[in-house]
Amino acid sequence: MDQITSRLDPAKFRHPVTTAKGETRAHVALRGLETLWFNTGTLCNLTCANCYIESSPRNDRLAWLGLDDVRDYLDEIARERLPTRLVGFTGGEPFMNREIIAMLELVLSRGLDALVLTNAMLPLRKLRARLLDLKGRYGDRLAIRVSLDHYTPGVHEAERGRRSWAPTIDGLVWLARNGFRLDVAGRRFTNETEDQLRAGYARLFSELNISVDALDPVRLMLFPEMDPGRDVPEITTACWGILHKSPDDVMCASARMVVKRKDASAPAVLACTLIPYDERFELGRTLVEASAAVPLNHPYCASFCVLGGAACSR
């Protein structure tokens, strides 16, 4: 796996308006709330070597969201006529939340599409019958994205832990055999090129006889590896022209995430799925309050979104 060669300059990512060099920091305006994410809670059945948000069987810093929490935000989407079409569920492991099926039912019954990020292990297995029922009634409007960190058991288990490969593959194959709309999320934490990674996943999918197109960047998302202590450049307003990119391409131009912090009286809306603990990225209680522009004031803004070119939804 890649070695970190330099540590982050402590002067970086401090001020919301200017960078450590005094240049104007890039901000991203919300062009429209196309995707709303719910973090159902940080508890997970696994402890990964480098989880983006430190989920584990003991991390309950983000409490379980409830059905009423989801309903409140869906009501706001309808009331404010927001352009939201996709509702995503992430964690932790969303299928550990006791109300996840009811949440999905509510989203789908409102005419919105739903996406669940999962490791496809035992928590999903326990809900197979209920998921089949949802699929039977809502079809491809329910999508499942399975985290498979590499196309080989050894590398996957180096990240996810011993005995994590076989249950994930079992869940992946079950979803495919039962016709679920299925995507896979991998990680770019080896020294392989993207072409090599996609070729490796393609071989695996062929061996498993599942119809996931490994060359499709949506069907197989390959996320960049991140470390908040790794030295990355700050993103300035000049970077858009230098990189030939637009702020509209960045995830926070079209998405927000709802979390409920442990012991909090109410949920909060954050700018990003990847930065759940930094209070600078907490934008308000409601979706309307959370419509302000977001300063790219975190290393993940550079390593994942702008330079990494990644997004949790497409």
Image (tube, grey):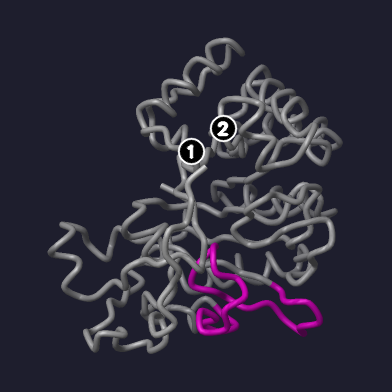
- Residue 12 higher or lower than 98, as above or below: below
In the picture, the disc for residue 190 is 1
Is residue 130 visible in the rendered structure shown here? yes
Please provide the residue range marked out in magenta.
260-286
Pointer 2 local density, CA inside 10 Å: few below 14, some 14–19, many at least 20: many
- Residue 86 higher or lower than 30, as above or below: above
Percent across and percent down for residue 197 are 44, 29
Residue shown at the point (24%, 89%) measured from the top left: 22
- Drawn side of residue 164 relative to residue 306, left or right: right
Residue shown at the point (51%, 79%) measured from the top left: 281
The answer to which quarter of the image holds residue 121 is top right
Residue 247 within the magenta-colored segment of the rendering: no
Look at label 2 and name its amino acid: His
Look at label 1 and name its amino acid: Thr
Residue shown at the point (51%, 52%) measured from the top left: 86
Q: Secondary structure at mark 1?
A: loop
Along the line of sight, which residue is nearer the eye, 58 or 268? 58
Q: Secondary structure at mark 2?
A: loop
Residue 271 within the magenta-colored segment of the rendering: yes
Along the line of sight, which residue is nearer the eye, 97 or 140? 97
Q: Which residue is mark 2?
A: 150
Q: Nearer the viewer, mark 1 or mark 2?
A: 1
Percent across and percent down for residue 162 are 78, 35
Label 1 and label 2: CA atoms lie apart by 9 Å
- Label 1 close to label 2 by CB (< 8 Å): yes
